[in-house]
Image (cartoon, rainbow, N blue to C red):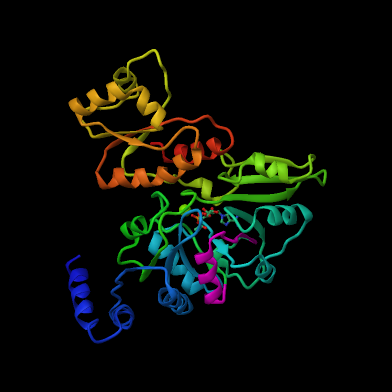
Amino acid sequence: MYLQTFFKFLVSSCGLCVDKFIVYSFLYHTICVVITQVFSANKQSLSQSAQLLQAWDLVSFPTETVYGLFADATNADAVRKIFFAKSRPADNPLIVHFADMEDVSQYAIIENDIQKLLIDRFMPGPFTIVLPKKNNIPDLTTWWLDTVCVRVPDHILARQIIREAWFPLAGPSANISWRPSPSSAQMVLSDMDTKIPLIIDGSRTLYGIESTVVKVEQGHNQHYLVKILRPWFVTKEDIESALPDDIKVSYTDEGVNESPWSRYRHYSPRASVLLFQHKTQKPLQDMLLDMGIDFDKSLSFIATKELLGHYSDELESLHNEYGCITMPLGSVSNLLECSQSLYQLYASCDKLWVEQIVIESFEEKGVGYSLMNRIRKSLS
Ligand code: TXA
Ligand code: MG
């Protein structure tokens, strides 16, 4: 910490006469001190991103879903740095990001018409598809699987950086493993400070939650089956409507160990997280006690503005008596807004050292299904 401050001082003094970026690079490559810079997106910062990526280094920048932590997907040494910076288990493979769909066939194989239909309908966008991989993607990127997750972000800045880098980019969300995915540059900084050299600040991301991941398989009867390995904004209903009626679409995110992703507890703030089922007949304090809430510990109540409105008097007295904090997720009629806030509010709870979080439960259909998938993964 003190070392960081000292080097930041040193760099700002040197920066009067020399390009700061050169000084940072010098410190990083000679004495392994990583000073994390946050730049807004402009011509200079974009070309610095490309330079760093070409030097097998890491850069974080936004996509339409969350901020990613990117490196050259075709280079195992660069990819290794991602696992190291995130403390990510190596058996959790990475998504490979392309600037344009036309580039995908150099690295992966589109095997059938169903994959093609899905790609044409949902890419670019918050949608990722598992395809057989070619040999130019190193094994470390995909944890020795013979498939690779392919994504084309619908984000001008992200696609521009990938284009300038000249190769596809491996990119998980830019958080320490187990922690909420970042939807702002500030969230990236709080997890990645001193671990990576550059964060490009492109303001809050649109969706705030990671892309939908799907895999197309052929059953014994030769019928295609679309498995949703990770649900999100492209919902089961959206996928069904893009395909012929006889194609079955199913969720496999619960229970079945289809995706390496499903093995781990995810999206967890430091606090213990409990799900709140709204029961009108009981006073709020009694319901919280039934759930095992300890009023001697700090507590945050995260809910839609409608539910907060319903309990406004009771929440006010819980605040006055026990310091319970209320955090509005958004409106129940706008689940995108709720999803955008979810990880941001978890991050705020971490900053405030909240010990217990109570979060509203949502009806599990459409986007509500995906939102509940993420909430369930964060439960204690
Ligand atoms: O929105 C997103 O998808 C963000 C942005 C940055 O693009 N990326 C992201 O990456 O969420 P990550 O690594 O946090 O999640 C990707 C998940 C992994 O956890 C992994 O288990 C699964 O996709 N995955 C990757 N390759 C796979 C494969 N070949 N087969 C099945 N699942 C795979
Ligand atoms: Mg992630």
Q: Which residues are magenta?
A: 146-167
Name the residue at 23% across, 78% down: 11
Name the residue at 36% across, 26% down: 309
162 vs 115, left or right, is: left
Q: Residue furthest right?
A: 221
Name the residue at 53% across, 68% down: 169
| Foreground of the two, 39 or 178 | 39
Examine the rendering and report whether any part of residue 275 can be seen: no
Residue 44 position, x and y percent, is 41, 77
Residue 242 position, x and y percent, is 72, 46
Name the residue at 28% across, 74% down: 33
| Foreground of the two, 306 or 252 | 306
Looking at the rendering, in which quadrant would you find the N terminus? bottom left
Q: Above or below — where is 50 with respect to 104? A: below
| Foreground of the two, 63 or 138 | 63
Q: Residue furthest top?
A: 281
Examine the rendering and report whether any part of residue 349 can be seen: yes
Count of marks, rendered view: 0
Q: Is residue 134 part of the magenta span, yes or no?
A: no
The image quarter containing residue 166 is bottom right
The image quarter containing residue 177 is bottom left
Looking at the rendering, in which quadrant would you find the C terminus? top left
Residue 377 position, x and y percent, is 46, 40
Residue 20 position, x and y percent, is 29, 80
Q: Is residue 160 part of the magenta span, yes or no?
A: yes
The image quarter containing residue 34 is bottom left
